[in-house]
Amino acid sequence: MTVAHVHPQQPAGVSTETYATVAVGRTASTGAAGGRRRRVRRDWSGWWFVGPFMLVFGLVFVAPLVYAMYLSFFRETLMGGNSFVGLENYAQALVDPKFWEAMGRVSIFLLVQVPIMLGLALFAALALDSARLRWVPFYRLSIFLPYAVPGVVAVMIWGYMYGSQFGLVADLNRFFGVELPSPLSENLILLSIGNIVTWEFVGYNMLIFFSALKAVPQELYEAAEIDGAGTFRTIFSIKLPSIRGALVIATIFSVIGSFQLFNEPSILQTIAPNSITTYFTPNLYAFNLSFAGSQFNYAAAIAIVSGVITMVVAYLVQLAGEKKEKA
């Protein structure tokens, strides 16, 4: 005679076999849920790698930006110290003729200097990428070398050569007995700064383009050669479309650098004070307002407005590059 063992929690009317099957399934489900709970436990080890960067990023970028925005909403008054003025500093910046003159100057600089610089860099990259040029490492290093020179040193070197009383221009005047136009004159100073910036950054942009050209699949060149494509056809049909992303990136960097123009006019101002005003560029204007005029609040507003304009222009350049790439 077989005796059925009844579990204390087994409901009446349910057979032992059925209850055992349900219990086993419930136990397995509970074990799986427990395993999922153990697997879901968050792993924080990745933050040990990104944490130092996030800390430095917050201290040197986010915190100063937030503090600048805070300052821009206040104004120093003779009675009462710092007082909240809301958007008055921004309203003043938008109608400030000095600010817009500086913004117009860097816009002209951007429209003239950037295409010339990127054109020279692209030409150099294409020349280095061609199979006809020998000693490529030597030429690549020679073109890139000016970028390795610190910006302050580069401006001082060119400032010395530009001097009409000393340096290269003065020597040429004395040697040929002529009076060449001074590169530091008011009419030529922006052109001279553009020459310095071009000399500094052609090698940097050349390296971006050259690296992108080296990533082009060799099969495309072989197919073009089979089809009988010449050198210029290969450049315009394969090389340039393949490095469009690098062209867009270099253009965006150059746009940002143009609106942030500061080192070159700031250093040359000591040599040519009559040619470079205190508001020659937006950054120089904000710097002089802050450290020479003690107008920290208004300088912060000028810097933020300039940053927003730079961001908008850079974004428009990026959108234009993406549309051309999709087309």
Image: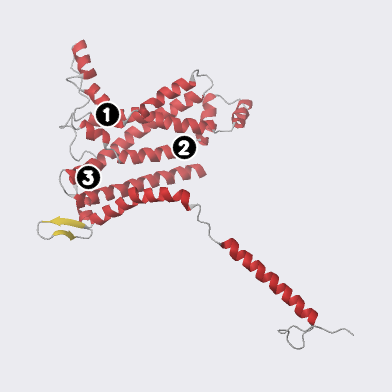
Amino acid on which disc 3 is placed: Ala
Q: CA distance from mark 1 to mark 2?
A: 28 Å
Q: Which mark is residue 286?
A: 3
Look at the numbered disc 3 and give the secondary structure of its residue: helix
Q: Nearer the viewer, residue 234 or 81?
A: 81
Q: Earlier in the sequence, mark 1 or mark 2?
A: 1
Q: Nearer the viewer, residue 313 or 327?
A: 313
Q: Which residue in the protein does label 1 denote?
A: 155
Amino acid on which disc 1 is placed: Val
Amino acid on which disc 2 is placed: Ala
Residue 21 image point, x, y percent: 76, 76
Asked where in the image residue 6 lies, by quadrant, the reply is: bottom right
For this orientation, the residue located farthest to the left is: 79
Residue 177 image point, x, y percent: 18, 11
Q: CA distance from mark 1 to mark 3?
A: 21 Å
User: In the image, is residue 133 above or below residue 223?
Assistant: above
User: In the image, is residue 308 above or below residue 198?
Assistant: below
| Label 3 Cα crowd, 10 Å radius (few <14 / some 14-19 / many 20+) | many
Q: Which mark is residue 246?
A: 2
**What's the residue at 38%, 29% (across, down)?**
202
For this orientation, the residue located farthest to the bottom is: 12
User: In the image, is residue 116 above or below residue 52?
Assistant: above
Q: Nearer the viewer, mark 2 or mark 3?
A: 3
Q: CA distance from mark 2 to mark 3?
A: 32 Å
Q: Which mark is residue 299?
A: none
Q: Nearer the viewer, residue 137 or 176?
A: 137
Looking at the image, residue 13 sits to the left or right of residue 228; the answer is right
Looking at the image, residue 121 sits to the left or right of residue 272; the answer is right
Q: Give the image's coloring scheme.
A: secondary structure
Asked where in the image residue 3 lies, by quadrant, the reply is: bottom right
